[in-house]
Amino acid sequence: MYKDLSTEQLKNEKQAVQKKYDEYKAMGLKLDMSRGKPAPKQLDLTDDMLLHCLDGAHISENGVDCRNYGVLDGIYEAKRLFMPMLGVGRYEIIIGGNSSLCMMYDNIARAMLLGVLGGKKPWSKNEHVKFLCPAPGYDRHFAICESMGIEMITVPYKEDGPDMDMIEDLVSKDEEIKGIWCVPMYSNPTGITYSDEVVRRFANLSPKADDFRIFWDNAYCVHHLTDTPDHLLNILEECKKTGKENMVYIFTSTSKISFPGGGLAVLAASEANINFIKDQMGYQTIGYDKLNQLRHARFFRDFEGVQEHMKKHRAIIAPKFETVLNILDKEIAPLGIGSWHKPNGGYFIAFDGLEGTAKRTVELCKGAGVVLTGAGATFPYGKDPMDRNIRIAPTFPTVEELQKAMEIFCESAKLAALEVLEK
């Protein structure tokens, strides 16, 4: 382990790692692992959706002409795909456009401008608006807050989810805290799934703000990688038990199931929340793309069809996760210079290097032709206080490309660690 090496041994090891890194750098590789994108082979799985799912048959099963205006909350066939996926009823769901991120942004914007159900005034009428941000987390969540001038408060992760003691304390005392971001299953980027206890504690929150909302981004709820997938408790059902069902908004999409640029996005919430949001949405749109909703419904048929389809995705990406984890186990674990969680699903692996090494590791990788998500991106304002977290996105490259990229990553992480230990 590097921490046990003498000064002379560290010097010799650094020379050896530098030589190997320089050899990789001389290859002139260009590999991009900066975003969690499906690979082309994954997109090929749904190509038939574009060919024969409609064939001119554009009337839904209850008589809706999907070419025309109307049906603000989405056709029933599309709802049937998502109701069992999220554990919600017919009147607790809205089928939107192609982006759950857009639906999240819109809900924040409407809350800022118009307020939420049960709130006394729009969020923007408060002197300050604050959001809790479990980190490391999804950079685009944080970007929404930053773009709207919402102050972000970082909440650390534990092994079973965010620090609930801290969350309970903060929301009970500060009326300016209006919400919290959550990726509760196979979280981005840690891969952690919230425990039953954590979900129940969310449902039992007693916020000082009467217009507090949990933004429950369940993006990876069917993205399993093993035969023993994680289980996530139904947050809406738990909130109903505590009489706080209006406190949560749930989001998901088919962005990594069908097409990232042409999928379906979903908002689920209590029936009262859905009705309130639909009233606000009526000024924004007459309805989303029902032809795309019908196309998805006919391709997948039902939730069981979605589950079967996800097995095909798993066959493509599970070997990529194994490649990353095997190389980390072989190259990094014995040296004691990094840690990571082995996820049961999702799209990412979060690597925690030695303190003060993340930016340098990403810089070294870029120098050798491997582009990663920027160090710090997984924290509010792009500032990782310990400069150690790096998000690894294995899905887009081929296994062969990934093998080479991870070899470069490991040499870069070693070199960054040795530079810190030499000081």
Image (cartoon, grey):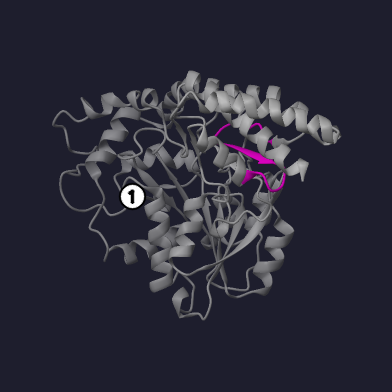
Q: Nearer the viewer, residue 53 or 381?
A: 381
The answer to whether residue 345 is magenta is yes
Q: Nearer the viewer, residue 165 or 85?
A: 165
Task: Residue under label 1, please give it.
Answer: 96
- Percent of width and height locating residue 76: 32, 43
User: Residue 151, located in which quarter of the rendered image?
Assistant: bottom right
Q: What amino acid does circle 1 point to?
A: Gly
Residue drawn at the location 50% of the way across and 20% of the way down: 399
Residue drawn at the location 61% of the way across and 49% of the way down: 136
- Mark 1 burial class by Cα count in 10 Å: few <14, some 14-19, many 20+: many
The answer to whether residue 103 is magenta is no
As helix, strand or loop, the secondary structure at mark 1 comes to loop
How many dots with numbers?
A: 1
Inspect this view and state whether residue 320 appears: no
| The N terminus, quarter of image | top right
- Percent of width and height locating residue 222: 50, 34
Q: Nearer the viewer, residue 384 or 68?
A: 384
Inspect this view and state whether residue 253 appears: yes
Q: Which residues are magenta?
A: 340-358
> Which residue, as the protein is rendered here, is positioned at the far left?
56
- In the rendered image of this protein, does residue 351 appear above or below residue 299? below
- Percent of width and height locating residue 304: 44, 28
Residue drawn at the location 35% of the way across and 28% of the way down: 43
Q: Examine the residues drawn in magenta and state their main secondary structure.
A: loop
